[in-house]
Image (cartoon, grey):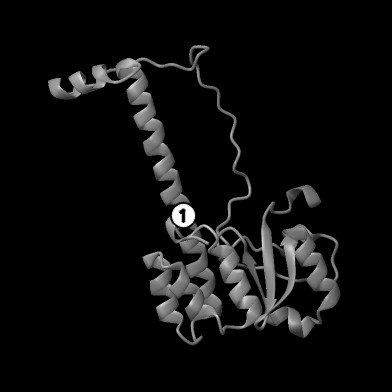
Amino acid sequence: MSNTLPHIYCTAFLGVGVVASGSFQHVVTTVQKSLSDRELTQLLIFDDSTGKPIDVVFRGKTDDEEEQFGGASGTEVNHQSTRRVGRPKLGVVSGEVTLLPRQWEWLKSQPGGASVTLRKLIDEARRAGKKQSTIRESQEATYNFMTAMAGDFHQYEEALRALYAGDLDRFYDFIDDWAPDIRNYIKKLAINAFSEENGT
C-alpha cells in the first residue's frame, strides 16, 4: 500500500549519470519502467538527506512497491510522536539558577533584567548550535556520497579536506572536473556544509 512507502527524496545513479530524482515512489517507478533488469542490478539509489545508499530489491513489475524498500539507508520513516507537556499558558517554567555574585550583578544590570537576558542568551546559543548541527549534517551527507561514488576520483582526498575545513572555493575547485551529475549532486548535498562567510 502506497501510504507505507518511505517519505523520503532520493536520487538514482546508473554509473556516473542520474536516471531519476524525486520521491522514493517516483524514483522506483521511473527506473522500473525505463531500465532493463541488468541495469537495475547496477543501479544505486541515494537518500537525499543523508547521502547514504538505499537498498532496494526489485522484483519485476510489481505493484507492491513497498516490498522493494530494503530499509538499509538508516533513514527513519516515522519521525512523529504524540506528546503532551503540562505547562502554563505562557510557556514559562520557573527553575533554580546558581550563579556567582558578579554574574548576578551583570544580569540584573542588563535591559529587561535577569530573566529576559537569560532567555536571550539561551536562544542565541540554541541558534548557534542548530547552525553547527546543520553544517555537520550536510558535511556528513556529502562525505557519505563522495565515499560511495567518488572515492577514486582525481583530488578526492583534497576535496574532503576542503569540505571539513569549510573552504568552499577550494572544494568547488577540486570537484570541478568530476562527472557533471556526480559534481552537481555533491553540490546539492553540500549546500549547507559551509558557514555563511564562506558561502556563495
> Where's residue 74, x and y in %?
55, 58
147 in relation to 141, above or below: below
Q: Is residue 14 left or right of residue 79?
A: right
Give whichever of 3, 189 is nearer the camera. Answer: 189
| Numbered disc 1: secondary structure | helix
At 49% from the left edge and 60% from the top edge, which residue is drawn?
199
> Where's residue 106, x and y in %?
21, 23
To which quarter of the image does residue 162 belong?
bottom left
> Where's residue 149, x and y in %?
56, 78
111 in relation to 174, above or below: above
At 79% from the left edge and 81% from the top edge, which residue is drawn?
37
75 in relation to 145, above or below: above
How many C-alpha atoms fall within 10 Å of the one at disc 1: few (<14), some, or many (≥20)?
A: few
Residue highlighted by disc 1: 196
What amino acid is labelled 1 in the image?
Glu
At 46% from the left edge and 71% from the top edge, which residue is drawn?
169
Give whichever of 21, 84 is nearer the camera. Answer: 21
At 48% from the left edge and 80% from the top edge, which residue is drawn?
174
> Where's residue 107, x and y in %?
25, 21
Can I make out residue 11 in this image?
Answer: yes
141 in relation to 13, above or below: above
Q: How many marks?
A: 1
Can I make out residue 100 in this image?
Answer: no
Residue positioned most to the left: 101
